[in-house]
Amino acid sequence: MQYRDYYEILGVTRGADAEEVKRAYRKLARKFHPDVSKEKNAEEKFKEVQEAYEVLRDNDKRAAYDQLGRDFRNGQQFRPPPDWSQRFGNSGGQRFSDLNGFSDFFSSLFGGAGAGGGNSGQTDADAGHLNVTVEEAFAGTKRRVTLNEHGRQRQVDVQIPAGVAEGQSLRIPGIGGRSSLIFRIRLRPHHLYEVAGKDVQIDLPLAPWEAALGAKVAVPTLGGTVELTVPAGAQSGQKLRLRGRGLPGNPAGDQMVIIKLVTPSAHSAAEKEAYERMKRDFKFDPRADWP
């Protein structure tokens, strides 16, 4: 199999902090998302970016990955160290696999999560994380996962209810004397939405004239596109609320829309003149409050 340099894929250094990693992911996810990208091999690139972020956003996975060292190069033939499973793998008799289409490289390093011993004397067994997309968390879904119990595989259907949140536990009752399983929800990162509890947040890029004059803008939500009225004089960083447009629940979460002003570049003579005219006509100093 081929080694994957997750830092190179995201375009960050090994010393990058969590916020840098997150920004790099969101930028690349928007660039390569198959629904909007015209880049060559966009879907493949998008999956690579998702896989890299899945590792580098998780402190445990990142620490384990960093143990491989700096000697490998992206695309180089690779085999995990002989003692990898003993050092970083599952020490119990049961393993859970939910790889979501990630590469063989990812599978070889992180293809299982601890799920306890799986014996009939236990009431609950920790089956590890279950990765779901934000869309799946909104609508609910069913996932078939594979459990490796003492060298034997069995499949379990997990019903994921609409409105599940990051870190939420799902208990699957045991059958035939088996332990009940506890899965913990982990939301996959999204190129548009950030989720906090039941609330969803999205950036709304606006042209300066839309913010200054006000506008009606079509805004995507998990339940479909809605028309949002942007008030005149909107400022960058201002939050607008779409009530009940977050994850389902009682009550449902909201969608927070964060204004982000985007200044167009002036290329033509006419565009440059338009900015010169604004400079003359507006008595505006953005640094007027400075001492």
Image (tube, rainbow, N blue to C red):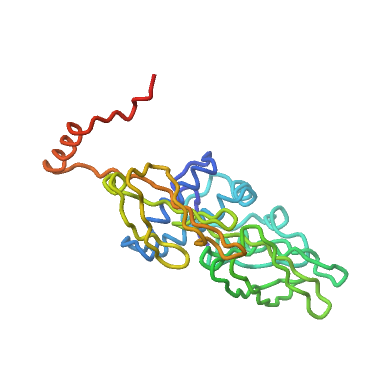
List the single residue furthest toward the bottom. Answer: 176
| Rendering coords of residue 165 (x, y %) | 61, 60
| Rendering coords of residue 111 (x, y %) | 63, 63
Q: Residue at x 47, y 67 (%)?
A: 223
Q: Is residue 58 left or right of residue 273?
A: right
| Looking at the image, residue 50 lies above or below residue 154 | above
Q: Residue at x 55, y 63 (%)?
A: 247
Q: Is residue 106 left or right of residue 75?
A: right
Q: Residue at x 67, y 55 (%)?
A: 84
Q: Quadrant of residue 35?
A: bottom left
Q: Quadrant of residue 221?
A: bottom left
List the single residue furthest toward the right. Answer: 121
For the C terminus, the quadrant is top left
| Rendering coords of residue 195 (x, y %) | 54, 55
Q: Residue at x 62, y 71 (%)?
A: 161
Q: Nearer the viewer, residue 93 or 122?
A: 122
Q: Nearer the viewer, residue 134 or 206?
A: 206
List the single residue furthest toward the left. Answer: 269
| Rendering coords of residue 179 (x, y %) | 80, 71
| Looking at the image, residue 219 lies above or below residue 209 | below
